[in-house]
Amino acid sequence: MRTLLTSGTRAELERLLAEPAVADYVYMYPPRQAYGPVDREELDAAIERSLARSGPVDLYLHFPFCRQICSFCNLYAVVATGHEGFERYVDALVQEAATYAPLLRGKQVDTVYLGGGTPSQVPPALIGSLLGELERLYGFDRHDVPEVALEVAPDTVTLERLGAYRAVGINRVNLGVQTGDDLEMRLIGRRHDAELPRAAATAALEAGFDNVCIDLIYGLEGQTDRSWRDSVDRVIELGPPTVCAYALTLRPRTGYAARGYAAVDPRTQIKRYDYAHEALLAAGYAQETHVRWARGPHGGYRQKANHWALSNVVGLGAGARGYLWECDYRNGYSARHRMPVLTDWFRRVAAHGHGRTDGFLMDHDERLRKATILGLHRLDRRRFASLLGCDVTEPFGAVLNALADLRLIEIDADSVTLTEEGMRHRDVLVQAFFSHRVRDRLSAFDYDDD
């Protein structure tokens, strides 16, 4: 991950806004490129202390299986489709979940998110069995959980299959549509045209899910301003409760990188963001963050909102990450050696009960930075002070004042909020709050070792 800001001074901010600049999506702090080896006993103790805190917890279960790896994707995934392999994987997930049971049993579970990869390749009955095991281990009722979400690839579902997922307790589906254009669909490596995702989205709405989210990406290979507008407009016509629009992040070890595809220029990316934002607002959506818009009583993305508010997210499965009060941890990752990560996760779960490989130990300073970075879109000053023991202006007053002088944020007695202009540049602006420790790790990171 390339860092663009080093100090957050007014002069530096003005320079980057004038260029302008765009940066990678910062959906976690620290970014995963800052992870490294952590003493096992220290990490275990940090996890125990984190989960001993009161408050609800969130569960993330990673299913790394995909029919193909999309050209833009650098998430942890393997090409696999076999039912027998799914059963073995779910058995190991349950074993890993059992390791956390002494720390989680009796706690309120606020969200369960099944992500990937493509968890919608896994049969509904097996998903239902997994949810039942989690209920047994942790002592909750899935029907009392506000968000039980499943990531869905459009070519893996029918109306009947979606209904079966809903019957076993899924109440939110996240459809990775990405584009409504046939050429862009082919160039990202999908084996279907753009009509299939629209049919899958229609089926998800007809199946009666409380919340259907559709993801789009701007900056894809072959994309034009016109094709982007058409993709956004078609999603709005479908009317899902939640829409996410992400700027493309280019990484080594992807299909795009192998073909030498370079991202479109920042001004074009900002223009495409602006179109999505204005069109969604006009259609009655409210902006929640710089990547998400929602409408109606069930729209939104509860687990991500909880994570960004510093709730504990427990990650299970190969490639999963946990985001906790005192640490982040990861269950392996590689974009070069995908199957060995899965093999190693099975081995670790069998030997230790969990698949943790590395992570990041948080201290108070890093936690202040995390709360500011992830909350900057609309930061509640009273909650920040109650949670962390100081007002956000105490550690970061100079940077916040520089942002306010440039009309990128508004500061009042209750909140710190990104302005419309600030929201356009959010992923650049939050880099001003990165610690020297994290910057040093990001600078030393080598994608050849990834």
Image (tube, rainbow, N blue to C red):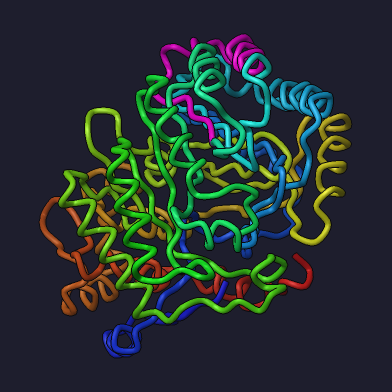
> Residue 71 lies in what quarter of the image?
bottom right
- Closer to us: 260 or 422: 260
Q: Which residues are magenta?
A: 128-151
Residue at (55%, 36%) from the top-left corner?
A: 152
Q: Quadrant of residue 139?
A: top right
- The residue drawn where x is 47% and y is 37% is 174
Of the pair 368 and 260, the residue shown nearer to us: 260
Q: Is residue 266 left or right of residue 194?
A: left
In the image, taking residue 309 as reference, residue 380 lies left or right, namely: left
Task: Please provide percent x and percent y for residue 80.
Answer: 78, 40
Question: Would residue 90 appear left or right of 367 to someone viewing this image?
Answer: right
> Percent x, y for residue 32?
61, 59
Q: Residue at x 16, y 78 (%)?
A: 405
At which x and y percent is residue 78? Answer: 76, 46
* Vertical arrangement, residue 134 with respect to residue 309, above or below: above
Q: Is residue 149 magenta?
A: yes
Place residue 229 in its image quadrant.
Answer: bottom left
**In the rendered image, the vertical position of residue 251 relative to residue 171, given as above or below:** below
Picture layout, residue 361 above or below residue 242: below
Q: Is residue 3 magenta?
A: no
